[in-house]
Amino acid sequence: MTEMEIALSGYCKKDIAHCTYEELYTALLHIVEEKSRQRIAPVKGRKLYYISAEFLIGKLLSNNLINLGLYDDVKACLEAHGKSMAELEEVEPEPSLGNGGLGRLAACFLDSVATLNLPGDGIGLRYHCGLFHQNFENGLQNERPDFWLGGHDWAVKTSKTYPVSLAGADYTARLYQIAVTGYEGRTNFLNLFDLDTIDESLIGDGISFDKTDIAKNLTLFLYPDDSDDAGRLLRIYQQYLMVSAGTQMILEECMERGSDLHDLYDYAAVQINDTHPSMVIPELIRLLCEKDIDFDEAVEIVTRTCAYTNHTILAEALEKWPRHYLETVVPQLMPVIEKLDMIVRSKVEDVSTAIIDANNIVHMAHMDIHFTHSTNGVAALHTEILKNSELNSFYRLYPEKFNNKTNGITFRRWLLKCNPELTAFIESLIGPGFKKDASLLEKLADFASDEKVLHQLARIKQDNKRALAQWLNHTQGVTLNPDSLFAIQSKRLHEYKRQQLNLLYLIHQYFEIKSGHLPAAPLTAIFGAKAAPAYTIAKDIIHALLTLSQVIAADPEVSKWLQIVFIENYNVTAAEKMIPACDLSEQISLASKEASGTGNMKFMLNGALTLGTMDGANVEIADAVGNGNIYIFGQSSAQVIRRYGNGSYCAREWYEIDPNIRRAVDFLTGSEMLSRGSSEHLTRLHDEFIGKDWFQTLPDFNAYVVRKNQALSDYAFNSYDWTRRALINISRAGFFSSDRTIAEYNEDIWHLGV
């Protein structure tokens, strides 16, 4: 018997062939925990504390087995006893601790910190039901609780608790820990806080619950519905629980390692991931003052300890809270915030940079920039826009604070785990070094003219397309044509990401096919996205896509050439199926609005060509692969910013002038759509296109149609060149490794001990 067979049968106390998958999963969970503990290393010098409202970590078993060097042994052991790794993975629930790119990035960063043998933990909340579980009923998004906590939970309950005062009442935060294993690296932790009093039975119809019963509801959901005051207040309750308990833990750990707190910045580097954890600044100051440290010194200590990552250009996403909200939930912080505002006003004449404005609104991002030592954007274009436009007044104050850290992804999850066939093929060509040093993928470019290599690469892509088709048939009863071009747009549903532009293209194609103008190749348009429960137009876009999919499916003339598939409950597991199967990666946000994107990197790494605007990290992808290996279209960020600045964009003018735009928009309220869809939802979306179209869908419509049809033609008529360009994309993906990103954070901002 192998060592793994002995270990598994020993834990299960019977022959592996007779074990249930649940028994094997539990045994492997214990084996992983034991191996992980062996890689815990002492901390010397600074330790990172990465505070984030989201950590979209995905299923952990296979990822941990890969990082610990156990995956191949486990897979071989299972197969030798008639068991399947794929079926074993189905036992594991997916942790509902995040939603979109922000949370997935945080998860990738923790993986890379551990892989680079850097001391660094995450700090967040243990949500019981995540954002929500999405399904579709009558062509509409339906939200239900996403229960995931149970017997197969990686989050280990500890005896550590911390007192937290909320609205004058005392609560007790409980610490849970998830081990974070690095690839051939150390073990760090994701620290999650919760209340023992949370009551999941409080949830009523759908995801509704009593938002005022804080002791029972505080960590039920990620991003509670903020369409009313109770929901907005609950977000502040959540954020303060996270930062208060997290701050107490940080100070406790640093003192245990020898800090007298006057030198806190020598022991801790606190990274504020977006504005959700901003209250860590006044909370740290408050607690240091309680330890008899002078206020001014406390401010200096915290400024040298904390750094801020800005993830958005959208003003509405930079959190701003009415003063009375904070006075209600965290009255102990308001004296600190008021003093910080006074410091700013005493030094800076520009009142637009104040923390508390004339309307008594508290600007969290302003506090973050003033009282941290670093503010970074997450892609080259994003950082330049922050410096030159959105945060220019702050950049003029603190040019030395601003820096760029282009996002990255962990190749262990998004190549080794989700595309093992491609991984093995790459390893056969260039060796295994790319698993640790992603820049070695550049060696693949040497094979760009090798017909045998390109043929095998195309075969692997086709295998992955068939695998996605089988998975969708099994999970949603959907039948796909694997010989069609798979164009995938998977990301949070938001108007700036412009799923509605894709919608108009698909309507346009419907008309073109009906009139006999057939596309060069069949197209399967695949979507994965959740819309926030209170985001009306986003939900209307989902409804329109689902309704259009029915119209097309019922038309034998069109359905031979065009299909729309919407993945229910898009999550990491679904992404792992979709990304290896993608031919054309849809990254079509309005230029200047997407901070970075990381889906674009995952698709590129797995051999998809990008169809995108010059937005976010698309700019750097285009630079890396060259114009001939990407499909760029649309307005530049400068054009978009100029339109916003002078107010020159009028959607109705574009609608009235362009017959193709008018035909596509009006189809939303035509008889074909209304016979299957909701007049309320379709009419509202129709009117939004004409009356507002805030994210300038219509000016980019024709350019999008041309470039997407060009991609279809290239795919159909020159498959050899398509695959060659796919290989070039893979070979240039190394820069977009989160290992590179984290190394830059550490060199420029954190300076962690090793």
Image (cartoon, rainbow, N blue to C red):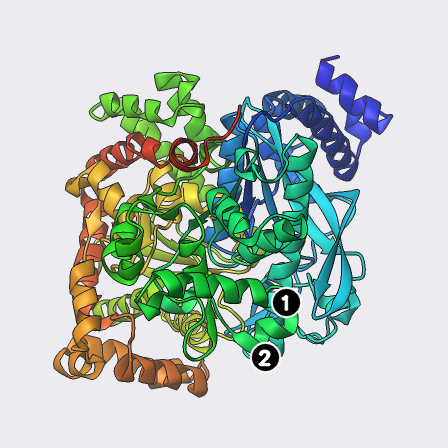
User: Which amino acid type corresponds to the residue marked 2 in the rendered image?
Assistant: Asp
Q: Is residue 602 left or right of residue 302?
A: left
Of labels 1 and 2, earlier in sequence is 2
Provide residue 461's location: percent of width, then percent of height: 38, 37
Provide residue 747's location: percent of width, then percent of height: 39, 31
> Helix or strand or loop: what does disc 2 sit on?
helix
- Per the rendering, the mark at residue 190 is none
Provide residue 436's location: percent of width, then percent of height: 44, 23
Q: CA distance from mark 1 to mark 2?
A: 15 Å
According to the image, label 2 marks what residue? 229
Residue drawn at the location 30% of the way across and 80% of the way down: 667
Question: Dot 2: few (<14), some (14–19), or many (≥20) neighbours within 10 Å?
Answer: few
According to the image, label 1 marks what residue? 330
Provide residue 376's location: percent of width, then percent of height: 37, 47
> Residue 373 appears in which quarter of the rendering?
top left
Residue 9 vertical placement versus 664 (above, below):
above
Q: Quadrant of the N terminus?
A: top right
Judging depth in this view, the residue of 162 and 74 nearest the camera is 162
Q: Is residue 263 left or right of residue 499?
A: right
> Helix or strand or loop: what does disc 1 sit on?
loop
